[in-house]
Amino acid sequence: MKLYNTLSRTKEELEPLNDKIVNMYVCGPTVYNYIHIGNARAFIVFDTVRRYLEYKGYKVNYVQNFTDIDDKIIKRAQEENVTTKEVAEKYIDEYFKDADNLGIKRATVHPKATEHIEDIIEFIKILIDKGYAYVVNGNVYFETAKFKDYGKLSHKNIEELQAGARIEINEEKKNPLDFVLWKAQKPGEPAWDSPWGKGRPGWHIECSVMSTKYLGKTLDIHAGGPDLVFPHHENEIAQSEAAYEQPFSKYWMHIGYLNINNEKMSKSKGNFFTVREITEKYNPEVLRLFMLMAHYRSPINFSLDLMEQANSAYERLLNAVANLKHLANVCKDGGLNEEEKKLMEKFEEYKKEFEEAMDDDFNTADAISVLFEMAKTSNANLSRNSSKKLVEYILDMFLKLSEVLGLSYRGVETELNDEEILALIEERQKARKEKNWKLADEIRDRLREKGIILEDTPEGVRWKRV
């Protein structure tokens, strides 16, 4: 299994430090608002990476943090006249609602910055004692010039980083690239006691502290969005390797950028979408499928037109599952004939192709193409006369491979009886008479998902199972 390592800029063989255990850290959200679809891409992708590793037999210790103290959280709390804790807890709850909807599994641990203040203080003490950090007016800064490998993740030297970075002028810093580890309290801000006075942790320090606390001083995989390469992940490497004098993470994974209608997502441009907004219009699994239909390192463009295409694609998979479930109920037991044995071998080849795609840097785009081939082949070759054993074998494989991608096809039920079908057809006819086209379409789609095809004729509605 190979994955692209941002650190080396090459695909490398996955060789975890502890054989069949993978220790993986993913930077989580700053909880002051609903997550947006850019966040969602990262969380969906790395959830899929985790799922595939587990499918391949690895035990994955998966840690994803919540940044629950930050300038944006403080600002939101002041605007709403509530505490920062209330803001954070509200949006942590909302995150879980969205994540659950998208099929994102809970992390092994979801640590919060505010619950690790003592750990953060102890970590900063180590950096001060080793001469990598300095204190000015209650603020503590990391001195980047002291860390000789600074820039190795972004593949730039300090001079290049200084020229390209948008850094606020701060006369307290020895160097513009020095970054804050501990922020002295400002009036009205929440704060904790420390050896340097009341204050709160900087952003970068929390991830170093929480990742090493739960996963050890060297991680297998550290992952996040493309905007985190510099400065966040660069700074994590500097402070972690300065403190512990060993590599911080063996592999670094980053997704590609997500644009909206070919432009960068921005509230000021009015092209900013939260997950909640999109999943009110579409099945959450459609959004998940959309995010996985491109390779994770490729930039992707989001638009409602493209979501419609993803919705149609999802319906094809949904219908395939509905058909297979229906056939699993109606087909009879019996041995496999020669054609069916060949078909079973064909599906073993599909499984191999799926795994080869995922083994090659988690190529979900090619893996999804295999699912569509499986759907096409099963639709063309299976019927009520097929062997139950064959149908169940194909259905089981289809669902297991889909599960790797986080697709569970929620809502696909097994066979309806004739009375239930006729009742739904009658309900649809009534909706059509009342010109309630939305309800009529929903009933037709619901029947189709369960393997029932309707045909409107001059003599009335005909239906058949597929």
Image: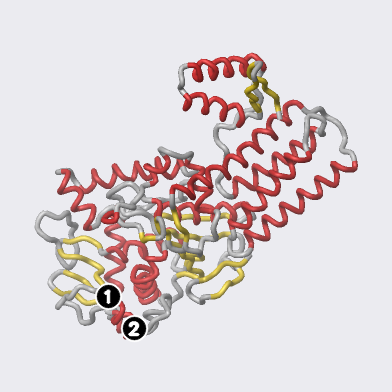
- Position of 367 relative to 318 (above/below): below
Residue type highlighted by circle 1:
Phe
Left or right side of 315 for 175? left
On the image, which quarter does residue 92 sit in? top left
Left or right side of 53 for 211? left
Q: Which mark is residue 142?
A: 1
Left or right side of 43 for 404? right
Q: In the image, what residue occupies the spot 40% across and 38% down? A: 280
Q: Which mark is residue 415?
A: none
Residue 128 makes an appearance in the image = no
Q: Marks 1/2: CA distance?
A: 19 Å
Q: Position of residue 288 (x, y in %)?
A: 50, 48
Q: Position of residue 34 (x, y in %)?
A: 33, 46
Identify the residue at the far left of this view.
Answer: 187
Identify the residue at the far front of this view.
Answer: 458
Q: Which mark is residue 160?
A: 2
| Mark 2 surroundings within 10 Å by alpha-carbon count, few (fewer than 14), some (14 through 19), many (20 or more) | few
